[in-house]
């Protein structure tokens, strides 16, 4: 499975949330631990709905959790 270009701060956010486990996050958002692991490792891009759920768990805006690199502009 190829990596996505979307990066995230999930591991850091879990660490600063009392070292929340991947399984605990998965339970909160209604997916498997393996799904959280794949998203965290940038091997899978979550749906928009799931991305919002993840951000909500940490009380963050979507852009504070996920980032997408801007394309270089051709001048």
Image (cartoon, rainbow, N blue to C red):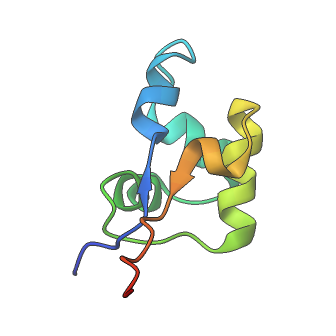
Q: Pick whichever, 25 or 9, lies toward us.
A: 9
User: From what the image shows, is residue 28 above or below residue 51?
Assistant: above
Residue 51, x across and y down, in percent: 65, 60
Residue 45, x across and y down, in percent: 47, 72
Tell me the quadrant of the picture where the C terminus can be found: bottom left
User: Is 31 placed left or right of 52 in the picture?
Assistant: left
Q: Residue at x 56, y 35 (%)?
A: 24
Q: Residue at x 47, y 64 (%)?
A: 68
Q: Pick whichever, 66 or 22, lies toward us.
A: 66
User: From what the image shows, is residue 34 above or below residue 65?
Assistant: below
Q: Residue furthest bottom?
A: 74
Q: Quadrant of residue 21?
A: top left
Q: Pick whichever, 34 or 14, lies toward us.
A: 14
Residue 59, x across and y down, in percent: 76, 31
Q: Residue at x 54, y 12 (%)?
A: 18
Residue 41, x across and y down, in percent: 30, 55
Tell me the quadrant of the picture where the N terminus can be found: bottom left
Q: Quadrant of residue 69?
A: bottom left
User: From what the image shows, is residue 35 above or below residue 19?
Assistant: below
Q: Pick whichever, 38 or 59, lies toward us.
A: 59
User: From what the image shows, is residue 32 above or below residue 72?
Assistant: above
Q: Residue at x 34, y 61 (%)?
A: 42
């Amino acid at each position: 499975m190829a990596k996505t270009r979307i990066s995230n701060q999930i591991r850091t956010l879990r660490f600063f949330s009392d070292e929340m486990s991947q399984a605990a996050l998965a339970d909160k958002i209604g997916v498997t631990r393996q799904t959280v692991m794949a998203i965290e490792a940038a091997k899978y891009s979550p749906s928009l709905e799931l991305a919002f759920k993840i951000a909500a768990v940490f009380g963050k805006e979507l852009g504070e959790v996920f980032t997408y690199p801007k394309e270089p502009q051709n001048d």
